[in-house]
Amino acid sequence: MTKVLLSVHVLAAILAIGPIAVAASLFPRYARQAAAEGGEGAGTVAFLHRTCRAYTVVGAAVPAFGLATGASLGVLGDAWLIASIVLTAAAAAILVLAIVPGQRRLLAPSPDAAVAGRAVSRLAMATGVFNLLWAVVVVLMIVRPGSTTGA
């Protein structure tokens, strides 16, 4: 059963978090481009936002299967897993509290281009932090400090 849980956890991470990382990373670029072209390309920006929103819901399966896998392996108390859980929670908070709402605000017409430009920059930074947190979680999952598997 552990192998099945681990497989589903990894597949969920690839298929849910991957699209969020890509769409969220592309959003600032296309938002800037759409603003510079007077709204041209707004459809692409809206599509990227919908992608992030939809996969955010699907992405909830990743920590659920991760916790089930950790329980099955008996490693819920290991420091590397606790660190991964904390980093995953931080990434989720950034996604739900900064990235998705920031994208939504940028989709609304803004009379002030300077404010919109700063918002795009903040969104790009939040997205970079989100992606960095996930990269660290992936490394922790692979290296598992203190593991006796020889990895």
Image (tube, helix red, strand yellow):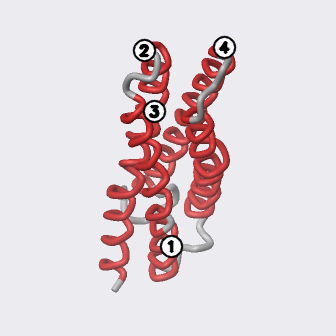
Q: CA distance from mark 1 to mark 2?
A: 42 Å
Coordinates of residue 148 in the picture (x, y in percent): 43, 65
- Crowding near the residue tagged with mark 2, few <14, some 14–19, many ≥20 C-alpha atoms within 10 Å: few
Coordinates of residue 77 in the picture (x, y in percent): 62, 72
Mark 3 or 1: in front is 3
Mark 4 or 3: in front is 4
Using the image, determine if residue 110 lies above or below residue 87.
Answer: above
Residue under the image location 57 percent in, 46 percent down: 100
Asked where in the image residue 114 lies, by quadrant, the reply is top right
Checking the image for residue 114, the label placed there is 4
The residue nearer to you, when weighing 1 against 131, is 131
Instruction: For mark 3, give the secondary structure.
Output: helix
- The residue where tag 3 is placed is 27
Instruction: For mark 2, give the secondary structure.
Output: loop
- The residue where tag 2 is placed is 37
Going from the N terminus, do you reach mark 3 or mark 2 first?
3
Q: Amino acid at mark 4?
A: Ala
Q: CA distance from mark 4 to mark 3?
A: 18 Å
Going from the N terminus, do you reach mark 2 or mark 4 first?
2
Checking the image for residue 64, the label placed there is 1
Residue under the image location 43 percent in, 57 percent down: 55
Are discs 1 and 2 less than 8 Å apart at CB?
Answer: no
Instruction: For mark 4, give the secondary structure.
Output: helix
Mark 1 or 4: in front is 4
Residue under the image location 35 percent in, 63 percent down: 10
Going from the N terminus, do you reach mark 1 or mark 2 first?
2
Q: Amino acid at mark 3?
A: Phe
Residue under the image location 31 percent in, 77 percent down: 3
Q: CA distance from mark 3 to mark 1?
A: 27 Å
